[in-house]
Image: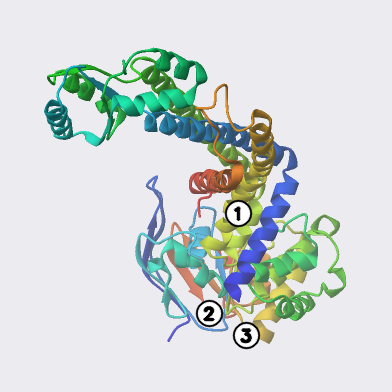
Amino acid sequence: MKFIRIKDCYKVYKNGVAAIAGLTLDIDKGEFVFVIGASGSGKSTLIKMLYREEKPTKGIVEIGGINVSKLRNRTVYKLRRKLGIVFQDFKLLPKLTVYENVAFALECIGMKGSEIRPKVLKALEHVGLKDKTRSFPNELSGGEQQRVCIARAIVNEPKLLICDEPTGNLDPNTSKEIMSVLDAINKDLGTTIIMATHDKEIVNRMKKRVIVLDSGVLLQDHMKGSFKISETV
Amino acid sequence: MKPFRIICRSFRDSFKSVLRNFSLSMASIICTTITLILVALAIIVTVNVNHMTKVLEEELTIVAYVEKDATSEEVEEIKNKIARIPEIKEVIYKSKDEWRLEMMNSSETLKDTLDYLEGNPLLDSFIVTVDDDEYLAPVAKEIRDIDNISSADYGEGMVEKIISVFNIIKNATFVIVIALIIVTAFLISNTIKLTIFSRRSEIEIMRLVGSSNTSIKLPFVIEGFLLGLVGALVPVILTIYGYMLAYEKLGGSISFAVIELVKPVPFVLYTSLLLLIIGSVVGMFGSARAVRKYLKI
């Protein structure tokens, strides 16, 4: 059984814009998948449907056997506890330290204090920020802030990591660092990663599976390593 | 244990939030305090007015005097006729000799006067109580229509006026209190609204990392509860000490002995409890409104 199954999926917004039109897609456990496409191609909508911020108008979105589209609003949290989400704008709390920001994710779901500490330190070690636990977000560089965001996303050991343009605000060198962190998470922890991006340079270099969307339709699906920058639309 | 941890966390967050938005929290607390002081006054006035009305009403009786020359059979017949009136609670016969004795016992002057007079100039009578004070007038009229009754009177006019004034006071305080409670609920709701806005990013992250809706909403409801509860503290203290002092100074009664104040214990305790309940419920209600309106999750 596929880990993520999207079948005949449509998303039409209230204003009549069709963001996703008949998308069918399967993703295996442990895969690293890039989702690329121009602005308005439906990347963000697809990502949002995966963490059930948006509901498909029609069709099936299934993650680990859970039909995400059928989840009620008040049970969405059960899905979110199995996911990690990384954002372009980091979404860190400025008044909390690095450690507290990561621990916050576990406190929110009612985890015991004694369980939180080792998990947070482990997650910060993964992203290489173990020595910055007491820093505040405004004392960190953009790349470091994004690493805190990644640590927060993986601290609960999710099976799926969803990244919405995580390098969008970063310079090329920092982007590389972030990508190596994500790659290590994918390889070491076996976490499935889906990443929406504009950065074709990264996509080309990483040699992973690439899904190209255009106007909400699956334009190309390149298996691992077969994508070339010249092929982009 | 998990729900317990979430509740503890919610309390911690609510306390933090009250301190973080200190000036706004203070505004809500002060408004709640002022409202609840007025509510306390209203409760004290209403309960005492009710008490006084009851005391007055209990004293309301119709005294029906029998004609001087009525025979004992006729008196018996009058008694039967009065007893047949459906609104009657009790009929007590009081002979002119009993009246005489009572009057002679009550004052020396009266005793001398009555001794001086030949025979007993007083009249036999019936003391009639009715089920409700509104029956006083019709029952008195009915008794007057019975043969051999010389007169049937009760505290006409004065008593009714006092009771109607009391009723106006009761209704007016009730309306004022309700209006104030609504204003307080709105103010607390507004405070919570601002808290929600100031914690927007936190709420967003909570949603994304998988906090349940209840654990997101709970701190705000608790914050409203705390604002209401803290706002009730000063009114509670004022009620307890203020009422006890007033009771002591007034000696338990106002202007004349008939109208007496309700005893402070357990009245102030019940009132304090009620104030705490009103404060916290209004606080929670106000914050629930804000959460429903502004916290879209």
Q: Residue at x 69, y 86 (%)?
A: A188
Q: Nearer the viewer, residue A180 or B105?
A: B105
Q: Is residue B111 left or right of residue B75?
A: right
Q: Residue at x 44, y 56 (%)?
A: A215
Q: Which label sits on residue A190? A: 3
Quadrant in the rendering for residue B244: top right
Q: Hey, what amino acid is under mark 2? A: Met
Q: Is residue B173 above or below residue B224?
A: above
For the residues labelled 3 and 2, the Cα–Cα distance comes to 18 Å
Disc 2 element? loop
User: Mark 3 or mark 2, which has the lower sequence index?
Assistant: 3
CB atoms of marks 1 and 3 within 8 Å: no
For the residues labelled 1 and 3, the Cα–Cα distance comes to 41 Å
Q: Hey, what amino acid is under mark 3? A: Gly
Q: Nearer the viewer, residue B1 or A209?
A: B1
Q: Hey, what amino acid is under mark 1? A: Ile
Q: Do the residues at discs 3 and 2 belong to one chain? A: yes
Which quadrant is the N terminus of chain B positioned in? bottom right
Q: Is residue B58 left or right of residue A205?
A: left
Chain letter of the residue carrying label 3: A
Which residue position is annotated with label 1? B222
User: Neighbour class for label 2 at 10 Å: few (<14), some, many (≥20)?
Assistant: few
Disc 3 element? loop
Instruction: Give the colouring mode of the picture.
Output: rainbow
User: Neighbour class for label 1 at 10 Å: few (<14), some, many (≥20)?
Assistant: many
Which residue position is annotated with label 2? A223
User: Neighbour class for label 3 at 10 Å: few (<14), some, many (≥20)?
Assistant: some
Q: Position of residue B139 (x, y in %)?
A: 21, 25
